[in-house]
Image (tube, grey):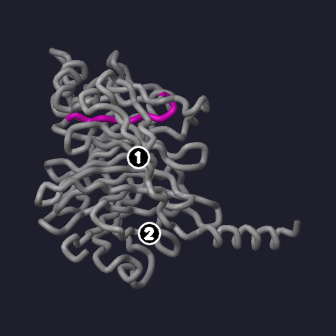
């Protein structure tokens, strides 16, 4: 077939299926609440396993992180967003440390900084002052239960991150599992404490190395929820962790827009204590490049990032209320350690009082 005809046909096909309408999720009640993993009942034992008596509180490696301000990429960026959403800030992050990059899961910290994970098996702290990067950062390589550094992608492909009271929970692809690290008490010397073994197959079909739990979140009630990136190119199954350490796919599917995969989840609460779920979806094809959609549970609105906006491989999302009505949504991109990609940090503000 003539190359121009082939490209035209492909473009028509993409246009026909480009409307990013979410698919209604399917929910199946999995088990009784008494069988669910709970942060409150599990945290003490996980801390003891991750930070045994006598383990030093080793400080992470200090690194410099340069932050160059960037725009969303179109003249009137906010006109492309819902009226209640503002593009607050954007930066392209770089560092002289060669192991800075590959960032995925993202969490806000009580001290106002950000914590993220790298798929080389490392924690990365991004220093903020007044909600803007201040040039400082820290890096710590993840350690296994034996205190030795996690080795290679097979052990260290960290993707999802959930944080509570200084205990970081990390989901890994390839060797599908969740581990806990007591960063509060042991810092960079925290060892992996086993939380859950995640499914390796669905209906007899193996889950691919790169189709594992990209999304991870501790719900306000203290239970632990995970989401697979996609299932054989289709929907993204959701699951919960049981008290016995098994990861159970519940039958619930994320509300993926057509052609998108689930890559991030975060839970926060508003001023009234009502839970708010923020979800990040990603899509890629060689013609349209990277695209992302962000949704939040208090509204049917969404943030859609696509060309000609400045978009990269966003995989991490974190949410917090910066005042009673303003939901701050942070996004970070995985540059795959490629010179052709960037580590972008974006902040969007949602006026929930105007919705």
Q: Position of residue 242 (x, y in %)?
A: 32, 28
The magenta span reads: 167-175
Choose between 162 and 222: the one closer to the eye: 222
Location of residue 191 with respect to 319 vertically, above or below: above
User: What residue is rendered at 23% in x and 23% in y?
Assistant: 46
Residue 304 marker: 2
Spatial CA span between label 2 and label 1: 25 Å
Q: Residues within 10 Å of mark 1 (few under 14, many from 20)?
A: few
Label 2 with label 1: CB-CB less than 8 Å: no
Q: Main secondary structure of the magenta part?
A: strand
Q: Is residue 39 visible?
A: yes
Q: Residues within 10 Å of mark 2 (few under 14, many from 20)?
A: some
The residue lying at 23 percent from left, 31 percent from top is: 38
Is there any visible trace of residue 98 in the rendered image? no
**Which secondary structure, mark 1?**
loop
Report which quarter residue 326 is drawn in.
Answer: bottom left
Q: Is residue 263 magenta?
A: no
Q: Residue at the spot x=58%, y=69% of the render?
A: 18
Give the mark nearer the N terminus: 2 vs 1. Answer: 1
Give the number of the disc on residue 27. 1
> Between residues 69 and 180, which one lies in front from this camera angle?
180
**Is residue 198 found left or right of 84 in the rendered image?**
right
Foreground: disc 2 or disc 1: 1
The label shown at residue 210 is none
| Element assignment for label 2 | strand
Quarter residue 8 falls in: bottom right
The correct choice, above or below, for 237 with respect to 296 in the image is above
Q: Position of residue 245 (x, y in %)?
A: 34, 23
Instruction: Tell me the quarter of the image containing the N terminus.
Output: bottom right
Q: Seen in the image, is 218 located left or right of residue 341?
A: left
């Amino acid at each position: 077939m003539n190359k121009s005809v082939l490209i035209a046909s492909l473009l028509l096909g993409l246009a026909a299926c480009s409307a990013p309408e979410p698919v209604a999720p399917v929910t199946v009640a999995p088990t009784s609440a008494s069988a669910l993993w709970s942060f409150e009942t599990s945290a003490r034992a996980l801390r003891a396993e991750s930070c045994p008596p006598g383990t030093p509180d080793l400080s992470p490696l200090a690194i410099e992180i340069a932050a160059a301000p960037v725009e969303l990429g179109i003249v009137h960026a906010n006109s492309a967003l819902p009226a209640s959403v503002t593009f607050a800030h954007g930066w392209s992050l770089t560092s002289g440390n060669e192991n800075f990059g590959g960032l995925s899961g993202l969490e806000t910290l009580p001290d106002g900084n950000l914590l993220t994970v790298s798929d080389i098996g490392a924690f990365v702290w991004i220093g903020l002052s007044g909600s803007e990067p201040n040039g400082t950062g820290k890096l710590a390589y993840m350690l296994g239960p034996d205190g030795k550094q996690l080795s290679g992608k097979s052990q260290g492909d960290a993707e999802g991150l959930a944080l509570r009271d200084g205990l970081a929970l990390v989901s890994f692809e390839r060797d599908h599992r969740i581990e806990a690290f007591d960063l509060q008490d042991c810092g960079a010397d925290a060892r992996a404490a086993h939380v859950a073994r995640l499914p390796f197959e669905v209906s007899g079909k193996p889950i691919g190395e790169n189709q594992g739990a990209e999304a991870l979140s501790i719900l306000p009630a203290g239970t632990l929820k995970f989401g697979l990136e996609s299932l054989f190119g289709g929907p993204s199954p959701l699951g919960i962790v049981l008290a016995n350490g098994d990861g159970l796919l519940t039958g619930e599917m994320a509300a993926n827009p057509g052609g998108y995969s689930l890559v991030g989840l975060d839970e926060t609460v508003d001023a009234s204590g009502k839970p708010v779920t923020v979800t990040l979806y990603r899509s890629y094809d060689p013609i349209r490049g990277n695209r992302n959609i962000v949704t939040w549970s208090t509204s049917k609105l969404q943030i859609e990032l696509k060309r000609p906006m400045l978009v990269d491989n966003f995989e991490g999302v974190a949410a917090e209320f910066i005042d009673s009505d303003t939901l701050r949504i942070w996004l970070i991109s995985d540059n795959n350690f490629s010179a052709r990609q960037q580590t972008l940090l974006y902040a969007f503000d949602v006026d929930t009082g105007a919705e």
